[in-house]
Amino acid sequence: MREFIFTIDYDRNVDPLMDVFIDHPETHSRSIACNVTDDGMWRLERVAGPEAALERLDEVFDSPVQCTECIGTRDCITDWHYEVIASEAGRRTVYSYRSEAGDCHSIPRLAIEHVGQGVLCETERRGSRCEWRLLLCSDDGVDDLFSALEAELRPGLTVEFRQLGEPAYWADEAVTLAELPPEQQAAVEAAVDYGYYRTPRDVSLTELADRLDVSRSTLQYRLQRAEAWIVRSFVTRSMGPVEADEAVAEGSRLRVGRSGV
């Protein structure tokens, strides 16, 4: 398996969907699941941001011909279904289905044409940038795919090659809290259950340690190790493994510097 990562950057006023993210830089979306065939694409996506941005996204998605994965100038007429299946303050989970019809060439369709079936796709939108991550059976056809992306671009869009290699990102994303060492997992779960992470806290670190029958220092160590793993996993999703490592290292240097003051 191979992992192909690239980004599309958008100028303002060239894509109504990306304009929402440009105008509201705190807004962020990420695919949860995505399925692609020659005939269409359906996916589940989590969107977070201010209500004003989410309402604007509703207006864009409600357009019956809006293709959010097309980057060219072709006449794209498509059947579109969009539904919010979960909603809370500042966050929505959205199901969408779009058919591939006529001359509509989306990025997933281009991927299938050039690298074959079996492609898994994930997208992340933030600001002016949409990052695409494709999991492929092999890298056969990737050069042709990238050339097709460049050729398809309409004015105001820029494509940037990011990475082609082993599927490290997809392997990392499969990691869950259950893969923490058992003692760290138990510490985090107890901390949540007893309200240690609430504001204000329902229980102190010492009280929580007494409930778990461990020393305060042992509990603190377990929580710190678990929190570091959780934070790094979260940052990796947005920054990538290399940038995440650099950020974590910089944070460690800052903590050391402060402790030495």
Image: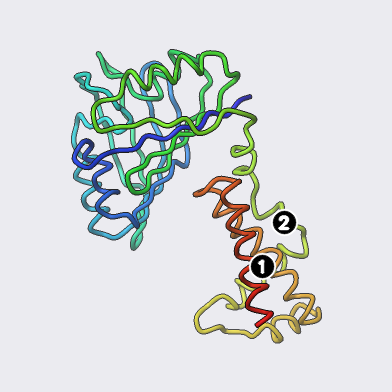
Left or right: where does residue 60 sit relative to residue 218? left
Left or right: where does residue 32 sit relative to residue 246? left
In this view, the residue in front, 63 or 137, is: 137
Query: Where 70 falls versus 20 (above or below)?
Result: above
In this view, the residue in front, 213 or 219, is: 219
Structural distance between the alpha carbons of marks 1 and 2: 10 Å
Counting from the top left corner in percent of width and height, residue 176 is at 64, 50
Counting from the top left corner in percent of width and height, residue 189 is at 65, 67
Residue at coordinates 53% horizontally, 20% vertically from top-left? 118
Counting from the top left corner in percent of width and height, residue 117 is at 50, 16
**Neighbour tally class for label 2: few under 14, some 14-19, many 20 plus, Cα within 10 Å:** some
Residue at coordinates 25% horizontally, 48% vertically from top-left? 20
Counting from the top left corner in percent of width and height, residue 133 is at 49, 33
Residue under pointer 1: 188
In this view, the residue in front, 223 or 34, is: 223
The amino acid type found where label 2 is placed reads Leu
**Neighbour tally class for label 1: few under 14, some 14-19, many 20 plus, Cα within 10 Å:** many
